[in-house]
Amino acid sequence: MLEILERSAIAAGQAILEVYDAGPAVTYKADTSPVTDADHRAERIILADLAAAFPDIPVIAEESVAAGNVPDIAGRRFFLVDPLDGTKEFVDRDIHFTVNIGLIENAEPVAGVVYAPALGVIYAASDGQARKAMVEDGRIAGGWGRIGCRHIPDRAVAVASRRHGSAETVAYLAEQGITECEAIGSSLKFCLLAEGHADLYPRFSRTMEWDTAAGDAILRAAGGETLTVAGQPLAYGKRNQPNDSDFANPWFISRAKPR
């Protein structure tokens, strides 16, 4: 399965780079978030690949959900897809955008791929193992390498959203005594924790499950965890929430291995 997800993410990333080089056409959804032709092209590629390889596994994909296409996932494993995570970065010619494909089983992210096409780097996880590789000309270059979280040091390093910061995030970092924090877009924040370059990712602003599933799968396989502010593992497949929309996440804290 993972090889198929990897190939699909890379193919979607190639389509995204074509639009990136040509200049995207931008429209806005009902929630005022931007969407581009790259989002739609990438999602079509991924959905076609998943339908061909795994016809019995439903797919929850960002742009399809926005169009009202939400398959039944009750009691089943399913994919969560964000074809272009970090659309605002993409539009602004920033390079920190990703393709995210995650597999959910029993409300947990058990496998995932995060591909950053402008950086030429791909992360993947399954069976409790996380790995990283470089991509050149649409192919894996130099082979895969295992990655893992480090134990959180006394002087922890945080990563935070570049565009969705909050007063609560600033307060949390101050409470934890963390003075070093890098702001970065997309699901790459999970990956930086997973490969031991950072230790904490507090997210006290809105995210959706397709934003986090693939990166969370990689972080958990690397030895980390994602917890709600109540200390429970972040769950997936949330429907009919009394205070929020389907698939919306509560605030959470992702972290590397605690001592």
Image: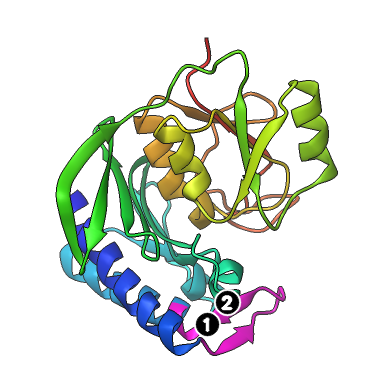
- The percent coordinates of residue 47 (x first, y second) are 31, 72
Disc nearer the start of the sequence (1/2): 1
Residue 145 appears in the picture as rendered: yes
Label 1 is placed on what type of residue? Thr
Tell me where the magenta segment starts and ends, as one range: 24-38
Q: Residue drawn 26% across and 75% down?
A: 48
Q: Residue drawn 18% across and 70% down?
A: 52
Of the pair 122 and 57, the residue shown nearer to us: 122
Q: Which residue is mark 2?
A: 91
- The percent coordinates of residue 31 (x first, y second) are 71, 73
Of the pair 143 and 168, the residue shown nearer to us: 143
Q: Which residue is mark 1?
A: 36
Residue 196 left/right relative to 147: right
**SS for dot 2:** helix
Q: Is residue 114 above or below residue 97?
A: above
- The Cα atoms of the two marked residues, 1 and 2, are separated by 8 Å
Number of residues whose C-alpha sits closer than 10 Å to that of mark 1, classed few (under 14), some (14–19) or many (20 or more): many
Q: Residue drawn 44% across and 45% down?
A: 215
Of the pair 171 and 248, the residue shown nearer to us: 171
Number of residues whose C-alpha sits closer than 10 Å to that of mark 2, classed few (under 14), some (14–19) or many (20 or more): some
- The percent coordinates of residue 238 (x first, y second) are 56, 48
Q: Is residue 179 above or below residue 160?
A: above
Question: Are the residues flagged by discs 1 and 2 in contact, CB closer than 8 Å?
Answer: yes
Residue 165 left/right relative to 121: right
Residue 166 left/right relative to 181: right
- The percent coordinates of residue 56 (x first, y second) are 24, 60
Q: Is residue 156 above or below residue 75?
A: above
